[in-house]
Image (cartoon, grey):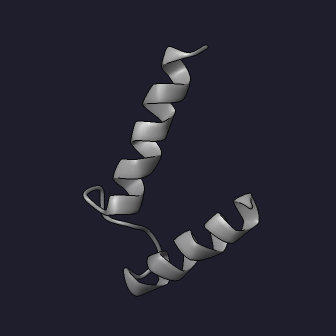
């Protein structure tokens, strides 16, 4: 599962020349997931 997500992110990154801009929905989603994960530590 994580592998598929990684491929999806890499596909998006290639559109932006290597890395996603901060406002990109994938970046926002990853930050939100991290915040939730930190709350439940």
Question: Does 4 appear above or below 40?
Answer: below
Question: Which residue extends farthest bottom?
Answer: 15
Looking at the image, residue 25 sits to the left or right of residue 5; the answer is: left
Q: Is residue 7 above or below residue 25?
A: below
Residue drawn at x 64%, y 75% as measured from the top left = 7
Which quadrant of the view contains residue 22?
bottom left
For image coordinates 33% across by 61% down, the residue present is 25
Does 11 sit left or right of 23 as displayed?
Answer: right
Relative placement, left or right, of 35 versus 2 is: left
Q: Residue furthest left?
A: 23
In the rendered image, the quadrant that contains the N terminus is bottom right
Residue at position x 61%, y 13% from top?
41
Q: Position of residue 23 (x, y in %)?
A: 25, 58
Locate residue 30, reporting x and y percent: 46, 47
Residue 8 x %, y %: 57, 74
Q: Is residue 10 above or below residue 39?
A: below
The picture quadrant where one finds residue 4 is bottom right
- What is the number of callouts on the image? 0
Residue 14 at x, y percent in the picture: 48, 83
Of residue 25 and residue 20, the one placed in the foreground of this image is 25
Residue closer to the observer: 15 or 1: 1
Q: Vertically, is 29 above or below 3?
A: above
Task: Between residue 26 and residue 10, name the one nearer to us.
Answer: 26
């Amino acid at each position: 599962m994580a592998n598929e997500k990684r491929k999806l992110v890499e596909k998006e990154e290639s559109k932006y020349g290597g890395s996603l801009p901060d406002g990109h929905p994938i970046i926002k989603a990853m930050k939100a997931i991290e915040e939730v994960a930190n709350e439940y530590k």
